[in-house]
Image (tube, helix red, strand yellow):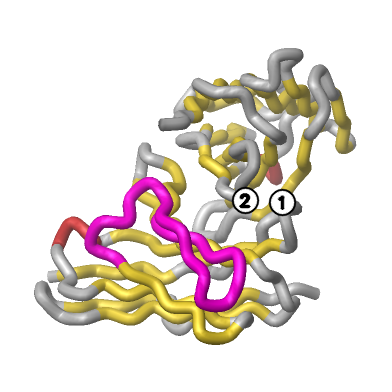
């Protein structure tokens, strides 16, 4: 059974801090995605990666960066956290254009 | 850029009533996926539609993909309390692995 894990379920950070969100998948999927979920806005794509060291911007990349040094791991970085980045962050992986497997999510609060 | 709108945003139904959510894209899609997110959970894949005019059924759930591949619908017959959650469509962008999620429809089933 595919498993996508995220480093934290809940995270509280201060404005201006650097924040790392980690995602690991165990099914050798080449595609990995970071979304944020906000009420009434659905899931919005921040970045995705289709191979190691490859990345593409999604719809809302501003204020975020990503890293994919190993196939199984995709990290989302908030260089300087701001209150408007308070959200639920969901990581997903997939093989090609087939179904996505989502992690449990990280609820980030920036104060 | 590509936009995927989903209506309605909320739907409350009595148990046993039918339910439909609609998904409309501003551009032609390569395929469409549907996900269900239970309260407090993460999105879980339901189905993928690829062909123009395609109809697929899963027990009480019927999924349709429009002839122009720009719209889709999910219909649930005789809802049950286990159907509670938010239903998302995700439109596949041609030539990439990028998927744009709709805003979701939150379904509440009253017993």
Image coordinates for residue B44, horizontal then vertical, percent? 67, 54
Image coordinates for residue A19, horizontal then vertical, percent? 27, 79
Residue at the spot x=73%, y=77% of the render? A28
Residue B55 sits in quarter: top right
Q: Is A54 in the magenta?
A: yes
Residues marked 2 and 1 touching at CB (< 8 Å): yes
**Rendered view: B39 above or below B51:** below
Measured Cα–Cα span from mark 2 to mark 1: 6 Å
Residue B93 sits in quarter: top right
Q: Is residue A67 left or right of residue B78?
A: left
Q: Is residue B25 left or right of residue A11?
A: right
- The residue nearer to you, when weighing B2 against A12, is B2
Looking at the rendered structure, the secondary structure element under dot 1 is loop
Residue A91 visible: yes
Image coordinates for residue B97, horizontal then vertical, percent? 62, 51
The residue carrying mark 1 is A97
Question: In the rendered structure, which segment of residues is drawn in magenta?
Answer: A46-64
Residue at the spot x=57%, y=69% of the render? A103
Q: Which mark is residue A28?
A: none
The residue carrying mark 2 is B97
Residue A83 sits in quarter: bottom left
């Amino acid at each position: 059974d595919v498993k996508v894990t995220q480093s934290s379920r809940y995270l509280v950070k201060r404005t201006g801090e650097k924040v790392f969100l980690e995602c690991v998948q165990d099914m050798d999927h080449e595609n990995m995605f970071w979304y944020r979920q906000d009420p009434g806005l659905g899931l919005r794509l921040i970045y995705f990666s289709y191979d190691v060291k490859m990345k593409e911007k999604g719809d809302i990349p501003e204020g975020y960066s990503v890293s994919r040094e190993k196939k199984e791991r995709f990290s989302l970085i908030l260089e300087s956290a701001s209150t408007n980045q308070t959200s639920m962050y969901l990581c997903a992986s997939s093989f090609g254009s087939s179904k996505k497997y989502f992690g449990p999510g990280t609820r980030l609060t920036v104060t | 850029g590509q936009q995927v709108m989903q209506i309605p945003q909320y739907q409350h139904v009595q148990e046993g009533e039918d339910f439909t959510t609609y998904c409309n894209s501003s551009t032609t899609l390569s395929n469409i996926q549907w996900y269900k997110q239970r309260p407090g959970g993460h999105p879980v894949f339901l189905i993928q539609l690829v062909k123009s005019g395609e109809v697929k059924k899963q027990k009480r759930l019927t999924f349709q993909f429009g002839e122009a591949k720009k719209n889709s619908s999910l219909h649930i017959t005789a809802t049950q309390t286990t159907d509670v959650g938010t239903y998302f469509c995700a439109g596949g962008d041609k030539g990439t692995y990028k998927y744009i999620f709709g805003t979701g429809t939150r379904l509440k089933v009253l017993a």
